[in-house]
Amino acid sequence: MMGIKPGKGLILIMDERVSRTLGCTRSLVFLSALFVVLVPGVFGQTNAGQSGTASQATRTETRVPAFDVVSIKPNKSSSGNNNSTSFSSESFSATNVSVKMLLEDAYDVKQDLIYGLPGWASSDRFDINAKIVEPDLELLKKLTPKQAEGMLQAILVDRFQLKVHTETKTLPVYEMVVVKDGPKFKASAPEGSPEDKSPNGVARGAMTVQSSVQNTELTGHAIPLASLANMLTDQLHRTVIDKTGLTGQYDLLLKWTADDGTDASSDSSTPSIFTALQEQLGLKLQSAKGPVDTLVVDRVELPSEN
């Protein structure tokens, strides 16, 4: 669910989803009772008009495993962004996480697009430990991301008394378009061909974003521009809509100053992300307003400690 957060580290986007290894990383999944979940969840709904096997699958109730024991305790460390999560086949643990962080993962929505939270849901931190006593390892291996999100949604409902709804708001956005002279990147070579070479060792279908003290560098191999737009959304804290009309898979190289959306400092030759997009990729971001799906919290309560 996931995107770029302040800090240093490596980000991999595989199959257009993000797996982060940063100074603050999180994962999904935990629950307190066996239940049936209908996927997908609140966000990412499949159009009702779609036909075929995939559409039929979204209407099939899927048995989802549950954690038999879930412990939630307040974290009093005051350690800021020093938070972590760990998920294995039969257990989940999270340290120093807020409800807002959990909502981001549970509903696949950026934190900037979550409304209605009380102050404590962003500031208070929790330590969570959960365990499946007799895990069905084969079932766990087959979990989809949406099923994992559904498991997290369920514990928020059960333990935090969460009630939410989605709402489309007209908000400032960026439209990503091609500059007048055209794009400065090429479509990826066919998979397995002699020309199919991985930039900087990046796997096909993946993107890495490496941050240093001043600069950030992106490398993508055979990725759609939708993945770039998603990364930019995280980086700029504003929804970026792909308006390029380019539908292929591309190899991308981009380097910009670590300052999010600001001009590079006078002692750095690296441009801002806006300038870098134009000079290095032939793309630009133009301000606009458009419909954006948001998550509105109607109710959330502090959990009882156990």
Image (cartoon, rainbow, N blue to C red):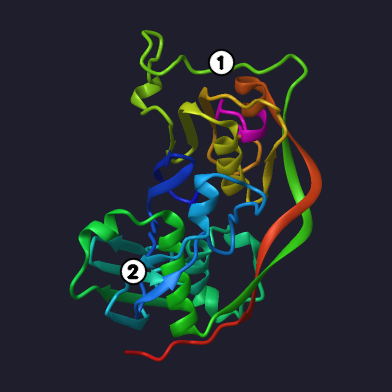
| Image spot of residue 293 (x, y percent) | 69, 58
Which residue is depicted at the point 74% across and 22% down?
179
Q: Which mark is residue 306?
A: none
Which residue is depicted at the point 54% across and 73% down?
122
Relative to the observer, which residue lies in front, 184 or 30?
A: 30
Left or right of 284? Residue 132 is left
Q: In the image, which is nearer the foreground, mark 1 or mark 2? A: 1
The quarter of the image holding the C terminus is bottom left
Question: From where the camera sits, is residue 89 visible?
Answer: yes
Disc 1 residue type (three-letter): Lys
Residue identifier under label 2:
94
- How many residues crowd mark 2 within 10 Å: few (<14), some (14–19), many (20+)? many
Which residue is depicted at the point 62% across and 34% down?
272
Residue 167 in which image quadrant = bottom right
Left or right of 289? Residue 126 is left
Residue identifier under label 1:
186
Q: CA distance from mark 1 to mark 2?
A: 41 Å
Which residue is depicted at the point 57% across and 48% down?
234
The residue range painted magenta reads 265-275
270 in the magenta segment: yes
